[in-house]
Image: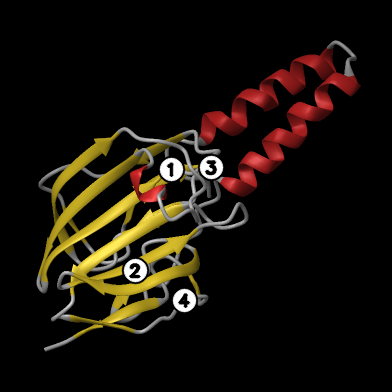
Amino acid sequence: MLARRSGHIVAIPLVFAIILIYFSHWPLAVPFILFAVFAAFFFRDPNRSIGRGIVAAADGVIREVEVRNGRLFVSTFMNVHNVHVNRVPLRAKVMGVKRVKGGLKPAYHKDAGANSRVVITFKTRIGNMRVTQIAGTFAWRIVPYVRRGQVLKKGRRIGIIRFGSRVDVELPAERAKPTVKVGDRVKAGVTSVAEVIG
């Protein structure tokens, strides 16, 4: 299954490849075929069995877990081999979707939080939650799937970062206890990153 709104990225190079093959230009078709295979792998979107507690918003490696100003902050770095479709960590109502312009520093850089990003704010049973999709150096674009007012079940897809590589989640620290540490590998919608307190 391909990620929503990404099929054309696979289809277009395949069409070029077919045309080139039809006109007996096999060597020229090879790069288009290879790109289509890579894109199909990169934009895969497997179905998931949703996990317990507050689940990961992204596939990848936990790069930061800390409490800042009363907020639990969990940051996940996505490598090129990870699924890049992001999911909502908890049942929530979308309160806002905001696109913010910025730089394109590597996602693991300490200042990457100022990169181009999409900030989605949610209202949940434990308080306000924020999920920030951050573009990396090679990001094409962030594509949110949700809009203000929607009520989402835990684990529902909320968007994709095309060739991007970081997702940050902020939760009320008094209601959420982390269940992961830096270096842990997580899967969006499956791995618990925190448990609800109270």
Give the labeled residue for mark 1. Answer: 135
Disc with the residue nearer the chain's start (2 vs 4): 2
Question: Which kind of residue does numbered mark 3 sit on?
Answer: Phe
Structural distance between the alpha carbons of marks 1 and 3: 8 Å
Q: Quadrant of residue 175?
A: bottom left
Crowdedness near tag 1: few (<14), some (14–19) or many (≥20) residues, C-alpha within 10 Å: many
Q: Are marks 2 and 4 in contact (CB under 8 Å)?
A: no
Structural distance between the alpha carbons of marks 1 and 2: 17 Å
Crowdedness near tag 2: few (<14), some (14–19) or many (≥20) residues, C-alpha within 10 Å: many
Structural distance between the alpha carbons of marks 2 and 3: 21 Å
Q: Nearer the viewer's eye, disc 4 or disc 3? A: 4
Eyeballing the image, is 71 above or below 58?
Answer: below
Disc with the residue nearer the chain's start (1 vs 2): 2
Task: Identify the element where label 3 is drawn.
Answer: loop
Give the labeled residue for mark 3. Answer: 163
Disc with the residue nearer the chain's start (4 vs 3): 3
**Residue 63's spot in the image, x, y percent?**
46, 67
Residue 154 appears in the picture as rendered: yes
Residue 145 appears in the picture as rendered: no
Question: Which kind of residue does numbered mark 2 sit on?
Answer: Val
Structural distance between the alpha carbons of marks 2 and 4: 9 Å
Give the labeled residue for mark 4. Answer: 182
